[in-house]
Amino acid sequence: MIKLALIGCGKWGKNYLKTVTAIEGCELKWACDLDYQRLNQAAPVYHQTRFTENKADILNDSEVQGIIIATTPESHYKLAKEAISKGKAVLVEKPVTINRKDSNDLIELAAAQNTVLMAGHTLIYHPAIKKIKGLLEEKHIIDDLCYLNMSRTSSASQAPKVDVLHDLAVHDIYLSRHLIGMDPIWVIANGESYIHSPYNNVINILMGFPNGKIASIFASFIHTEKTRKMTLVASKTKLVFDDAQTADRKIQLFDNGEQEYFLAVEENLEPLTQECLHFIECIRENKEPLSGSENIEFVAKIIDCISDSLAKGGEKIIIS
């Protein structure tokens, strides 16, 4: 029985709470939050989990093998560092850290402690993305790829102290590399903070890959609707992934400009469930996660370059 703990029971933490407690062979022993009202609401629902306002209860419990951190982004680094220092496996919700230096520090510490460090890059574990990745490799579509166009928008209110780059756009940053199978070589980014926000709530990103392949990313907190869409265009094939659709209509494949068919997604597990199952597997087998150190280091480096481009008014930044 793998014993886990959760720090952060807020907006996304509630999803982890529900997901982990439903997994067989796993016990969510502790859940921690500084908001007593949240704990008071959750405790009657999840009887087998102990709720606390004190993270030390979790960090000092030798039975806890892994900790999921789903707090505000600026607190991730300190909490993850404390957990790793105690020899705990750690799953950190994105963004893992706000800057590249802190990400590299966590990577080095996890290696020194010989423990698991994993990012909550949920889309890597999405059954539809697994199917698309297999299709691209099977049909050698990536060799023929022209560009990826990705849109991730929301009309929900922007979380305090959160930039759209770290919240929405980060998904498409790691996803583009995951699907294309290589690292970008340059980035260009423009962003704006509208409606009295000190943080960017709209961003446009261009990433250039070897052989002329391009990924374009648009992310916005102030859109009129929620979109989760990706269009992949190759010379003879076009593939559209729309995560807002039902499982049998999420993936649409076109051949030579004509609609060919929808590809049904057979696996029924939610991406977050798949992610948590993978975390448990990595703890049990002490292996590197798909969204482990290499993935974390890549995202931190690209976000650093994008931030540099934003600060320089959309200047092209060569990735070294």
Image: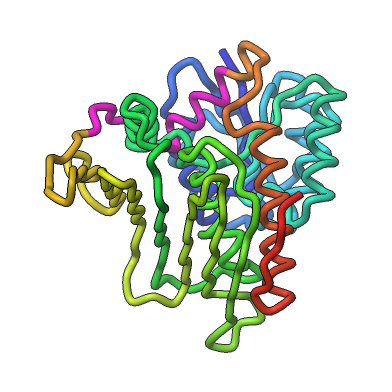
Is residue 279 positioned above or below 82 on the image?
above
Spot occupied by residue 279 in the image (x, y as percentages of width and height) = 57, 26
Q: Main secondary structure of the magenta part?
A: helix
Residue at screen point 70% across, 66% down: 307
Judging depth in this view, the residue of 307 and 149 nearest the camera is 149
- Which of 172 and 78 lies nearest the eye of the viewer? 172
Quadrant for the N terminus, please.
Answer: top right
Magenta residue check for 26? no
Between 113 and 171, the one lying in front of the other is: 171
Is residue 266 covered in magenta? yes
Is 228 above or below relative to 162?
above
Residue 167 appears in which quarter of the rendering?
bottom right
Q: Give the range drawn in magenta.
A: 265-281
For the question of whether residue 270 can be seen, the reply is no
Residue drawn at (81%, 42%) of the image = 104
The residue depicted at 34 percent of the width and 65 percent of the height is 226
Q: Give the quadrant of residue 64.
A: top right
**Direction from residue 284 to residue 230 in the image, left or right:** left
